[in-house]
Amino acid sequence: SQTIHQWPATLVQPVGSPLSLECTVEGTSNPNLYWYRQAAGRGLQLLFYSVGIGQISSEVPQNLSASRPQDRQFILSSKKLLLSDSGFYLCAWSVQSGANVLTFGAGSRLTVL
Amino acid sequence: AQSVSQHNHHVILSEAASLELGCNYSYGGTVNLFWYVQYPGQHLQLLLKYFSGDPLVKGIKGFEAEFIKSKFSFNLRKPSVQWSDTAEYFCAVNAYTGFQKLVFGTGTRLLVSP
């Protein structure tokens, strides 16, 4: 069966520091991968998605970037964190074909101080 | 671009009360529709989905949703809620345009009091 892992689960970082959140999927090949941010009262905002290695699409302009160095690995990064980057980040995957049924990871809670 | 509106941000019910959470989307073409649920401390998980066919779809734990194309709606219902239904519920739409991205509503927090 397929599983999705995210780490770290919780992170507290100072303003201006770098960020790296990792997500890996097991038990499937060539998945679509997604990064969402969940903010109270704002639902889930799609940040990035990827259909393959090295292929990243950004949904909103921001201080973050994403990379997909391997088929089942998706990384969310920042060179210098802002206070507004605080939030709950969710990684998700779906199969390439057919309708999008997303499976989500447990999430990473980022607090920028 | 498609968007999803959930009009109820917070709902408080007593056990055994009936539930209906509203969801409207904006897209005139073919869509797939979803309800996801996030129980306290747990992953976001799929509750039910609509792809085609019978517009009344049934999901886990006694939930159902009805797709009304003329109203661009996909409301979630449950005849009798339980304390364990306390969670946050998200409606989502996936439009058949280019890459199929899932767009979520802002969510509805449901609190069921015993």
Image (cartoon, rainbow, N blue to C red):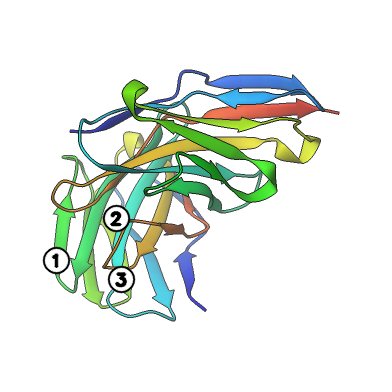
Q: Position of residue A71 (x, y in %)?
A: 26, 78
Q: CA distance from mark 3 to mark 1?
A: 12 Å
Inspect the image, locate mark 2, and give the three-letter code of the amino acid beneath it: Pro
Q: The residue under label 1 is which amino acid type? A: Gln
Separation of disc 2 and disc 3 at Cα?
27 Å
Q: Which mark is first along the chain, 3 or 2?
A: 2
In which quadrant of the rendered view does residue B27 lie?
top left
Which residue in the protein does label 2 denote? A18
In the image: residue B6, left or right of residue A81 = right
Do callouts 3 and 1 point to residues on the same chain?
A: yes
Image height of A27 relative to B68, above or below: below
Q: Which residue is mark 3?
A: A31
The quadrant the N terminus of chain B occupies is top left
> Residue type at mark 3?
Pro
A81 lies above or below A55: above
Foreground disc of the pair 3, 1: 3
Q: Which residue is labeled 1 in the image?
A: A55
Give percent across and percent down for residue B59. Answer: 59, 48
